[in-house]
Image: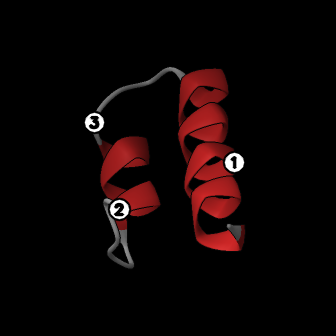
Amino acid sequence: GKGGGGRPDMAQAGGPDGAKADEAIEAVAVALAG
């Protein structure tokens, strides 16, 4: 799997789309959860 902390921060910095950043963070959280 693709692990790694701090990736959501990179997603946020990647663009002004707050909603997409939220989705990225949630996706990472779900992936980490199992």
Determine which residue is flagged by label 3: 14
Residue at x 59%, y 70% (from the top left corner): 32
In contact (CB < 8 Å): disc 3 and disc 2: no
Q: Residues within 10 Å of mark 2 (few under 14, many from 20)?
A: few
Residue 7 got which mark?
Answer: 2
Residue at x 35%, y 70% (from the top left corner): 3
Q: Residue 14: which quarter of the image?
A: top left
Identified by mark 3, the residue type is: Gly
Element class at badge 2: helix
Q: Earlier in the sequence, mark 3 or mark 2?
A: 2
* Distance Cα–Cα, label 1 vs label 2: 11 Å
As rendered, which of 5 and 2 lies closer to the eye?
2
- Horizontally, residue 1 falls left or right of residue 8, namely left
Q: Residue 12: which quarter of the image?
A: top left
Residue 26 got which mark?
Answer: 1
Element class at badge 3: loop
Residue at x 51%, y 20% (from the top left corner): 17
Residue at x 68%, y 67% (from the top left corner): 34
Q: Earlier in the sequence, mark 1 or mark 2?
A: 2
Element class at badge 1: helix
Q: Residue 7: which quarter of the image?
A: bottom left
Residue 19's x, y, as percent?
A: 66, 24
How was the colour assigned to the protein in this rendering? Answer: secondary structure
Query: Depth-wise, is mark 3 or mark 1 nearer the camera?
Result: 1
Identified by mark 1, the residue type is: Glu
Q: Earlier in the sequence, mark 3 or mark 1?
A: 3
Identified by mark 2, the residue type is: Arg
* Distance Cα–Cα, label 3 vs label 1: 16 Å
Query: Depth-wise, is mark 3 or mark 2 nearer the camera?
Result: 2
- Horizontally, residue 2 falls left or right of residue 9, namely left
Residue 10's x, y, as percent?
A: 30, 54
